[in-house]
Amino acid sequence: MPPLGDRELTPDQQRALQRITAGPRGKLLGPFAVLLRTPGLMDRVQEVGAYLRYEKALEPRLFELVVLMVARRWDQDFEWAHHHPLALAAGLPPDVVEAVGEDRREETTDQAVALVWELVDQLQRRGGIDDDVYARAVRQLGEEGVIEVVVAVGYYTTLALVMNVARTPPEAGPKLPPRAGVDA
C-alpha cells in the first residue's frame, strides 16, 4: 500500500495525521502511514503504542527486547531497523540483540533478560505461558510489567502484520540478519 498523498486525505485522516505528528512520535512512520486509511483505528492503536513506548513501567531494555523478538518472529524489517539502535541505547547487550536477530537463544546471566526472553518466546510459540514462568515474571516484573509485556507482544504483532501486508519498506538502519542455521 503506497502512502496516501496529502491531497487524498479525508478531513478525518487530516485530523488523525495532525494528532500523531503533534504527539511524541512527531511524524507519520511505518505502520501509521498504513493505518491512516482508518483514522479512528489509527488513533486508538497509536494511543496504545504511545503508552507502551513513553509511559510504561517496564525497563526500556526489557521493552526493547520484546519489540526485537516480535520483529524477528514476523520478519519485520521496519521495526527491526527502528528499534535495534533503541535497544542498544537502552542497555540491551549487543550479543543478546545479535542472538534475537539470528533467532537463537543466547545464554545470559541477566535474570530479567532471560525471563522476558522466555516469557515472549512462550507467548509467540503457544499463545500463553507456563505457570512457573508466570510466577517468576510476577516476582521479577510485577503484575503491571507482565501485562505490559503481553500487550507489547500483541501490539507489535499487530504492527508487524499491518506492515507485512502493506509491504512497508524498512527505514535506513540495521537489517534483520538471516536466522541461525538457515541459508541466506
Image: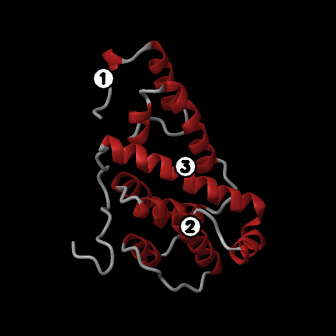
Disc 3 marks a residue whose amino acid type is Tyr
Residue at the extreme left of the image, as rendered = 184
Task: Calculate the distance from the C-alpha at mark 2 to the C-alpha at mark 1.
Answer: 40 Å
Q: Residues within 10 Å of mark 2 (few under 14, many from 20)?
A: few
Sequence-first tag of 2 and 3: 2
**Mark 2 vs mark 1: in front:** 2
Disc 1 marks a residue whose amino acid type is Gly
Secondary structure category for the residue under label 2? helix
Q: Are marks 3 and 1 in contact (CB under 8 Å)?
A: no
Q: Residues within 10 Å of mark 1 (few under 14, many from 20)?
A: few
Expressed as whole percent of the image width and height from the top left, the position of residue 19 reads: 53, 26
Which quadrant of the view contains residue 135? bottom right
Quickly name the residue at label 2.
126
Q: Which mark is residue 5?
A: 1
**What is the count of numbered marks?**
3
Expressed as whole percent of the image width and height from the top left, the position of residue 158 reads: 49, 47
Quickly name the residue at label 3.
155
Left or right, residue 137 beside residue 171: right
Secondary structure category for the residue under label 1? loop
Sequence-first tag of 2 and 1: 1
Secondary structure category for the residue under label 3? helix
Q: Is residue 171 above or below residue 133?
A: above
- Residue at horizontal 63%, vertical 65%? 128
Disc 2 marks a residue whose amino acid type is Arg
Task: Calculate the distance from the C-alpha at mark 3 to the C-alpha at mark 1.
Answer: 26 Å
Which quadrant of the view contains residue 116? bottom right
